[in-house]
Amino acid sequence: PVVADLCARGLATLVRDYFLHNLEETFRNNAVKMFWQKFHPYSSSSAVERIKFCVQESWPEDVLSAALEDICLEKSYQEKCVLVLAHALQSYEEKAQNRKLKAVQCSSSLMPRYQLMVSSVLLTTLPLSFPEILNVYFKKKLEELNTMVDASDENDQLASHELFGRSNVSAWDSKMDIDSQETVISESCTLVKNIGKVVRDFRCLGFTSMTEDSYSSAIIWLLKSKVYELAGDDYRIPVLGSVNKWIQVVPLQFLHALLTYLGDSVDYDSGLSGLKSPLASRPSSFPGIGVPSEALLRWHMRLEYFAYETLQDLRIGKLFEIIVDYPESSPAIEDLKQCLEYTGQHSKLVDSFISSLRYRLLTAGASTNDILHQYVSTIKALRSIDPTGVFLEAVGEPIRDYLRGRKDTIKCIVTMLTDGSGGNTSGGNAGDNLLEELNRDAENQENADYDDHTNIDEKQAWLNSESWEPDPVEADPLKGSRSRRKIDILGLMVSIIGSKDQLVNEYRVMLAEKLLSKSDFDIDSDIRTLELLKIHFGESSMQKCEIMLNDLIDSKRTNSNIKTSLLNAPGTVAGQEEAEISHDVLDATIISSNFWPPIQTEDLAVPASVDKLLSDFAQRFHQIKTPRKLLWKKNLGTVKFQLELQFEDRSMQFTVVPVQAAIIMRFQEKPSWTSKALATEIGIPVDSLNRRIGFWTSKGVLTESVGPDADDHIFTIVDSMSDVNKNSIVNESCEAFQMNEDEGESSVASVEEQLKKEMTVYEKFIIGMLTNFGNMTLDKIHNTLKMFCAEPSYDKSLQQLQSFLSGLVSDEKLEMRDGLYLLKK
């Protein structure tokens, strides 16, 4: 009656506002103050003390439960008061409506305004640390839930799918036959109920958004921890499948149970949701859930995307190590490929990997061979991730630019292609070189392309056309999709050098060096490598190399014929007694000098017995191969196991070059020589003698002493093994000493030496141009030489000219300023 009387006097709004104001004051001073007081110890503590709170097992669950219970009880009491007033206002409004009197409608807005007041009071007095308390609560609860799932999964894989019941609420009371599973399910149901009660109470207080953010961040945090736990640093095991399975077993099951408890789970087939597209297909069932609701579907997509993105970032951060271990790390590469297909964040991979390369690989401390092996592994790995090759182009460019600045790049590439151990980094048969592996790879790609065109019907062609996608925006428009899809590793290696001619020339020099060092004429592996190179570079490019190998084959046959004819010739025995060396010990490598790289020659006077042996061999060769004659390169070759130094109690055997053999054989004539006299006798410079004779002094065969002249040392052969042991040089019997690699000098002129010799012809032209024009750029010098040098014709590349000009700058004939070459003043 009092409310009706006040409303009749037009005070309905005043009654409502005054009533709500009094409720607000009461709620603020009693319930809210007591509610926040329960969290004051945590809010007022330091960071270290807060950690102590977090490690307590029952915190903050006990505090939250007690605080929510008290404030919800107070709110429930006030809601009853609000309902009494609302009923009174509604009665007056109904009477006024019947009498057709004008009345302010206050009853319908009373409860919403009260709810808004409650949430406003709580939010305006909210401590800054309260969201942190909520996060700790949900993290602890989800960790506990995950522990239960792990325990049940160890006992029975099927139990994990039934932990939270099925899609209806009655499943909370489900029982199972196995006691252990029943206990776990009961505990998990109780746990989710407790969480659901907390969420529901916070929703009633107006904390809906904050609560959802808290348990969402807890789920995301747990998911991230699980991804890091499963992924780790083991790249040989696929991870993505396990992550997806865990998402369905733990977070989705929990969310399904929570949404069902809160009454937010709407069946997919229900018409209540207006978000469903009429063209959308019916989703597949989840284990233990059945057909999920739309809210659960959105959660699934959100969690799945975050899992893919987290694993992607983890793998991208470790991509350098993954590629180092490739192909053992293929599962990690496959996971990364699927993640990138889902997220589309390829640019993140490119930027991060280029940064890792520049910081860890493209440095002065990394060897060229290591960089090239990493480049090949990068090509193979990124080809798996991105078959279009677009991102490989972006990643490979810094590596190619860096390798172009290294002088030994060409040599290392040739070694990788031809050495049996240099390129075998990714499986294949033992002893196979990288070239054989690339050839198999090319055949597989060709076969795949052939199958794509021949074994395809009209229906499949139509399906392929429907799944066609354009190239990424980063793609080079000058390269078509099909040419990019066929990634040629050898072609990418050649692109580092600039032209295949430079690679072929370097291979020719290395092949010559290798063939000249052979003594058994075993060239089967070299023939196999040459045939593979002919496939990639053409027969015309490899013609000279083929002639070099044929020379070795002919040499073997010629040696056999000459030895046979010398043995059967009359007077052979007497000749051998005079020479004291059998013809059987000599094997000659006979080369066609016009097709071989320039050979390093050095005058050498060999002992008379050896000279007689060479003369007999040359004479017999001339008789068999008339009118061809032999021109000996006496400084090249090896003297193997035939040079024996006889001591009083044992003998030692060596394998040495002819110069070293000629040096030691002179000590048969007399035991001591001065360096100048010995150099004159052998026919080599003194400095060359001192360098070569060091081999024998290091082995303890010769001793060195200072002569009357400071520049003329005396070398003396040791008399007994006791002198050798005294110097601690040789201690074992019948030890075979091999020549060290650094002691053996190159027998073939390198590509750089050949280029310098060929370019010397153009030096006068360059000096003349710079004299007339003052200064010129590299391009202008190159174009001018091509235009005016007719005899000899100029056919060098820009890189070769730049290398030659750099040599002239080093010789201080030219100088370079701001990209311009000018004469040195």
Image (cartoon, grey):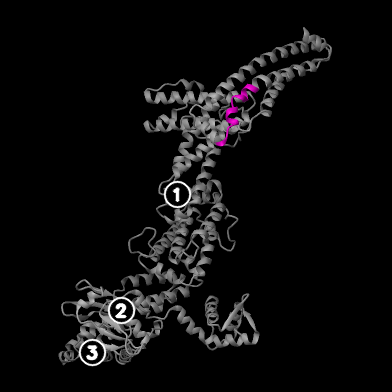
Expressed as whole percent of the image width and height from the top left, the position of residue 802 reads 55, 77
**Residue at 60% across, 35% down:** 278
Q: Secondary structure at mark 2?
A: helix
Q: Classify 46 as above or below 734.
A: above
On residue 670, the disc is: 3
- Please say if the residues under marks 1 and 2 sit with CB atoms less than 8 Å apart: no
Question: Comparing marks 3 and 1, which lies closer to the viewer?
Answer: 3
Q: Amino acid at mark 1?
A: Ala
Q: Is residue 35 magenta?
A: yes
**Residue farthest front in this picture:** 708
Q: Residues within 10 Å of mark 1 (few under 14, many from 20)?
A: many
Residue 584 in view, yes or no: yes
Expressed as whole percent of the image width and height from the top left, the position of residue 45 reads 58, 32
Which quadrant of the rendered structure holds the C terminus? bottom right
**Residue at which label 1 appears:** 332
Image quarter of residue 621 = bottom left
User: Which callout, 3 or 1, points at the residue further toward the start of the chain?
Assistant: 1
**Residue at which label 2 appears:** 695
Tell me the magenta residue range.
33-47
User: Which callout, 1 or 2, points at the residue further toward the start of the chain?
Assistant: 1
**Residue at 46% across, 37% down:** 246
Image quarter of residue 824 = bottom right
Expressed as whole percent of the image width and height from the top left, the position of residue 335 reads 47, 47
